[in-house]
Amino acid sequence: MENKVFKRTETTGTIISSARYNLTIGAVLCWGFFLNWLMVKHIDPVAIMAINPWIFFIGYFAFCFFGIYLFNKSNNPAISFIGYNFVVVPFGLIINIVVHAYDPELVLEAIRITGLVTFVMMLLGSLFPAFFKKIAGALTIALFIVIIVEAVEIFIFKVHHGVIDWIVVLIFCGYIGYDWGRANQIPKTLDNAVDSAAALYMDIINLFLRILRILGRRR
């Protein structure tokens, strides 16, 4: 689903300061990560994997697309925050299944690396927004191709080449810089802060999962 958040050039909402805007983005991101942590801590991954795969994936995509629809369409920060949570919860189920397959120290290392990479890409997105805007089309095409190639590898040839994980890491690094740059070019309202955090959350979680896989393979 196309993210229309970053195409907003006008607003009827109240403009807030840059500090409050960025603080809101950070707070919303932290809430998502905290909720994911609670899910990992308190939900048994065996119970998740016991769900019929078709029901799980249909529910996963239904929740995600509904959440994206809400924060794309709404100008109300409360409604957008609800949409954000509709994205965070299904992502949390996937995270739960994945992280329980790895040593906790490895997971912490992946979190540290993801945090550092995210900080650097946000800094670059602030310094060079025009560059990231130029490569946006290439990022989308690359991600689309990688999804197809990976699906063919897994479901037809039953293999997975590690280089794909590195390519995905690079793609989502680009997306973090791109989305952060765009987040600071739209009107600074509470609703736009929540919506921007939702887009960044998906970038960061995808980056984390791939970094974790790379680290796990190296160990």
Image: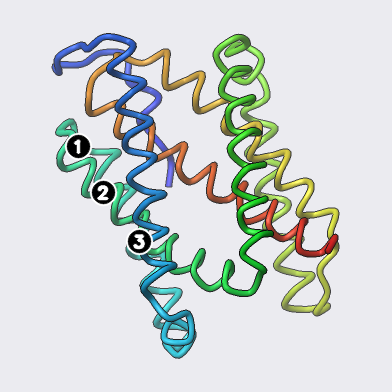
Mark sitting on residue 203: none
In the image, what residue type sits under mark 3?
Val
Q: Residue at x 42, y 15 (%)?
A: 184
Tell me the residue that label 3 is attached to: 89
Quadrant location of the C terminus?
Answer: bottom right
Look at discs 2 and 1 and give the one toward the viewer.
2
In the image, what residue type sits under mark 2?
Gly
In the image, what residue type sits under mark 1?
Ser
Q: Residues within 10 Å of mark 3 (few under 14, many from 20)?
A: some
Compare marks 1 and 3 and give the one earlier in the sequence. Answer: 1
Left/right placement of residue 169 relative to residue 25 reads right
Position of residue 210 measured from the top left corner of the image (x, y, whole percent): 68, 54
Q: CA distance from mark 2 to mark 1?
A: 9 Å
Front in this rendered view, residue 40 or 153: 40
Label 1 sits on a secondary structure element that is loop
In the rendered image, the vertical position of residue 45 relative to residue 219, given as above or below:
below
Tell me the residue that label 2 is attached to: 83
